[in-house]
Image (cartoon, rainbow, N blue to C red):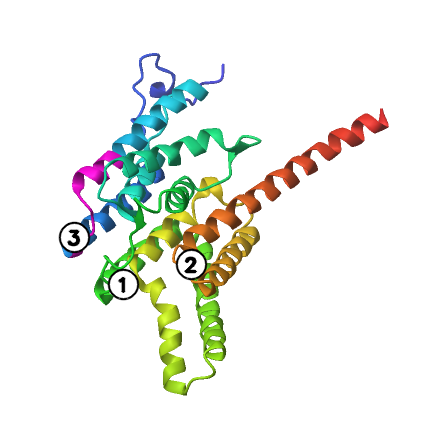
Amino acid sequence: MQQSTASPTATAPNATLAPRKRSFDSRYIAPIFITAILLVAQLSFSVLESYPRTLLAIATSILVEAILSRAFTGKWPHLASAYISGISVGILIRSPEYWPYALCAAIAITSKYVIRYKGRHLWNPSNFAISFMLFFAAEAVAPLNVQWDNRPWAMMVIWFVGSIIIWNLRRFHICATYIASFLCFALLRAAILNHWGGGMDSTMAWHQFQTELAPITGPVYQLFIFFMITDPKTTVKSKRGQCAVAFAVAAVEMILRLNQNIHAPYYALFLVGPIANFIEIWWTSRRNNAPATASLAVN
């Protein structure tokens, strides 16, 4: 009779299983990062209109997310995305009133459930809502702009931490493509403005280039680069496509800037992002349906 080599503990009916190690949920990384940015900015530069307004935006986002998720899917949602949308609204819009913060946050979350194509939402929620408010409620809402300081140490800390996080999430190529494109288009804008101005000497031309380059050094652009254009839910799937979209956003932004549009980055992403998503979703659906159509034709 062959003797079993199995361990007694492996076959014992009451054996205690080893406790499973809990891994950190990567969905919490972005909320932690954006909260750290907010705390540093508020303590250093007092960027918020008020704490209650920002908390109102966050609370509205979470509440609307919970209600709509239960209504549309019957499930309680993971609230990291809603928190990011709410805190982004609280940081990026300015208004002396309370209602724009609540309305903007509600629009952001609602857009995820209402404006969809074949199961995917097309716009980045925060970008959609902020663009909507800047266009339709310009008398009551302004974007965060010069209120943030461009001190090098603050910029470098955010860029360093943000780059590490985005690299670990394997989306750094999107940021790098946009930054490189912005630099090239800043040089092109400076050359065009130099030509329109009848030509400048080298010193004035250099100052013009610095002026065109300056926005990307501010925290507003850092939030835009790290959170809006890299949003996994609203970017195309292929790495090459993501780089192409980032380049296109920078190109459209250049055109808007040449036309003196102060909301250029928000509007550029608002225009380019959903078009790219729609094309990808349509093309993927068409390609997936092709084998089924061919099979029916054979039969």
> Helix, strand, or loop for circle 2?
loop
Q: Disc 2 residue type?
A: Asn
- On the question of residue 234 being in view, the answer is yes
Quarter occupied by residue 18: top left
Residue at point 51%, 61% (across, down): 251
**Residue found at the very far bottom of the displayed protein:** 201
Which amino acid type is marked by label 3? Ser
Q: In the image, which is nearer the foreground, mark 2 or mark 1?
A: 2
Between circles 2 and 3, the one closer to the viewer is: 2
Locate the C terminus by quadrant.
top right
Frontmost of labels 1 and 3 is 3
Residue with the mark numbered 2: 261
Instruction: Tell me which amino acid carries mark 1.
Output: Met
Label 1–label 3 contact, CB within 8 A: no
Mark 3 or mark 1, which is nearer the start of the sequence?
3
The percent position of residue 161, horizontal first and vertical second, equals: 29, 55
User: In this orientation, does residue 25 appear?
Assistant: no
Residue 195, relative to residue 134: is it above or below?
Answer: below
Residue wearing tag 1: 156
Magenta region, residue range: 45-57
Q: Position of residue 201 (x, y in %)?
A: 41, 87
| Residue, disc 3 | 46
Q: Quick one: 164 or 117, which is closer to the camera?
A: 117
Residue 138 drawn in magenta: no
> In screen coordinates, is 19 left or right of 169?
left
> Within 10 angstroms of label 1, few (less than 14), some, or many (20 or more) residues?
few
Mark before the other along the chain sequence, 2 or 1? 1
Query: In x, y percent, where is residue 246?
Result: 49, 55
Mark 2 and mark 3 lie on one chain; the one further toward the N terminus is: 3
